[in-house]
Image (spheres, rainbow, N blue to C red):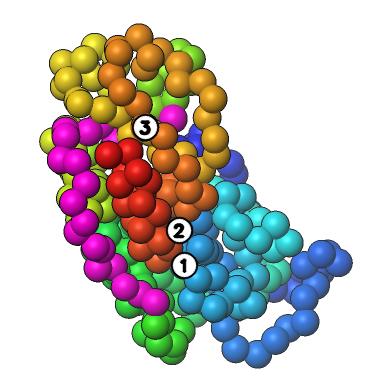
Amino acid sequence: MIKIIRFLACLIFTFSYSCTSSENDTQQEGIRVISLSPGITASLIDMGFSDQIVGRSAFCEMDSIPVVGDLYSVDFERLLRLHPTHVFVQQQVGGIDSHLEELAENGTFILRSWKLNTIEDIKQLSAGLSSMLKVEYPNANFEFDQAAISDEPTLLMTSGSDQNVGICFGNNTYLDDIWEAIGGVNVLERDGWQKLSLEDIARLAPSRILIVSDVHISNRGSLKTLGIPIIQFIHKDVLIPSTRIAQVAQSLQVRMVKTK
């Protein structure tokens, strides 16, 4: 889900700054990764590199690992205390934090970024991590079974609230890629993630609405007033583009076959 953008002032501290007890890990040799993207973090864990993750964003898994910031704001004091060899970020329209780029240029760590919009982006992430971390990832299979699910035009969206409609998945998004790969038709033909009103949805006239969420939703809010059938799909990884998307696709396919 989209998070509130936070812009905080950051100060860069030297490596000699003393560590707190929660971050004073054994300085192991080898790879030490800080990931500022939930999708990259999930992919690292999926590929067996959880032990190499020493820092994360607040939206990543692994509660025991220190939080060093997110896509928009980085705690550089904490980041430098963790002595990363690699820092991984998700590409954004506004570009990468200039302090991260400066530190990487000075040889403090290796900085890499990936887009995570489409299935092809996730393939590139998998290949890039495999090459950089010198591991053959055996489960990087993004070929989905094209079992015949109903081809009724469907609106794909996240859960909203009583007052607000959720965010809709248009073309060139990972959920649109999955939906097409398993035989579905996306009624929304615009690119990217779209914020639609109830009037917009009524004009699109989808045969059904698929609401995806990582938790159960009991209230479907104002969407019920449209009288369009609503299907809910729950999966803990559906809102995070990562190498786990193949499992999401398989579960989605099973869910849709059951609705026939």
193 in the magenta segment: no
Label 1 or label 3, whichever comes before in sequence order: 1
Q: Which mark is residue 39?
A: 2
Q: CA distance from mark 1 to mark 2?
A: 6 Å
Which residue is most to the right? 21
Q: CA distance from mark 3 to mark 2?
A: 25 Å
The magenta stretch spans residue 147: yes
Tell me if label 3 and label 2 are in contact, CB under 8 Å: no
The residue beneath circle 1 is: 43
Amino acid type, residue under disc 2 in the picture? Gly
**Which label lies toward us, 3 or 2?**
3
Q: Residue at x 16, y 33 (%)?
A: 153
Q: Main secondary structure of the magenta part?
A: loop
Residues at circles 1 and 2 in contact by the CB criterion of under 8 Å: yes
Q: Which residue is mark 3?
A: 231
- Residue situated in front as seen by the camera: 234 or 62: 234
